[in-house]
C-alpha cells in the first residue's frame, strides 16, 4: 500500500489527537483544536495508517496514487 494523499474531514475532527500521538511529524492540531497535515512524508505509510485507524471518528481519509480511497474502506 502506498499512500499518495491524506485528507482530514475538519467537520468530523473532534481534536482527540491520537493521530498526533502516533505520527506527530505528519499530524498536528491547529488553533481550533482540529487536526491538519504538517508533512505527509514525515513518517512511513504503515504508521500513517495506524494514525488514521486511531482516529475515533474516522476523520482521516487515505488515498493511493490512483486516487482510490484506501482508508477507511
Image: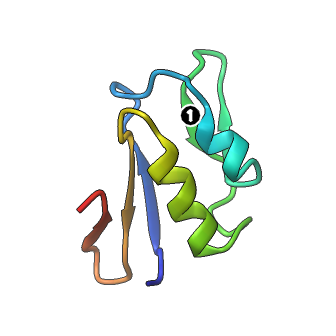
The picture places residue 30, in percent across and down from the top left corner, at 65, 25
Which quadrant is the N terminus positioned in? bottom left
Q: Name the residue carrying label 1.
A: 35
Query: Along the horizontal axis of the image, is 11 left or right of 24?
Result: left
Q: Where is residue 35 in the image (x, y as percent from the top left)?
A: 56, 34
Q: How crowded is mark 1: few (under 14 residues within 10 Å), some or many (20 or more)?
A: many
Quadrant position of residue 63: bottom left
Query: Taking 68 as reference, is 59 left or right?
Result: right
- Determine whether 20 is above or below 45 in the image: above
The quadrant where residue 44 appears: bottom right
Q: Residue furthest top?
A: 32
Q: In this view, does 43 lie above or below 14?
A: below
| Residue 4, percent from left and from top | 46, 74
Name which residue lies at 34% across and 25% down: 11
Image coords of residue 42 (percent x, y): 74, 65
Q: How many marks?
A: 1
Residue drawn at x 65%, y 29% is 29
Quarter holding the C terminus? bottom left
- Residue occupying image coordinates x 68% and y 50%: 22
**Res 26 quadrant in image:** bottom right
Q: Residue at x 60, y 19 (%)?
A: 33
* 43 lies left or right of 6: right
The local secondary structure at tag 1 comes to strand
Task: Please say which color scheme the image uses.
Answer: rainbow
Q: Which of 11 and 14 is in front in this view?
A: 14
Amino acid at each position: 500500500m502506498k499512500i499518495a494523499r491524506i485528507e482530514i474531514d475538519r467537520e468530523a475532527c473532534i481534536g482527540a489527537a491520537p493521530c498526533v500521538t502516533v505520527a506527530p511529524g505528519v499530524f498536528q492540531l491547529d488553533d481550533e483544536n482540529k487536526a491538519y497535515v504538517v508533512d505527509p512524508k514525515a513518517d512511513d505509510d504503515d504508521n500513517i495508517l495506524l494514525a488514521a485507524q486511531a482516529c475515533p471518528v474516522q476523520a482521516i481519509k487515505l488515498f493511493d496514487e490512483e486516487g482510490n480511497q484506501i482508508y477507511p474502506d
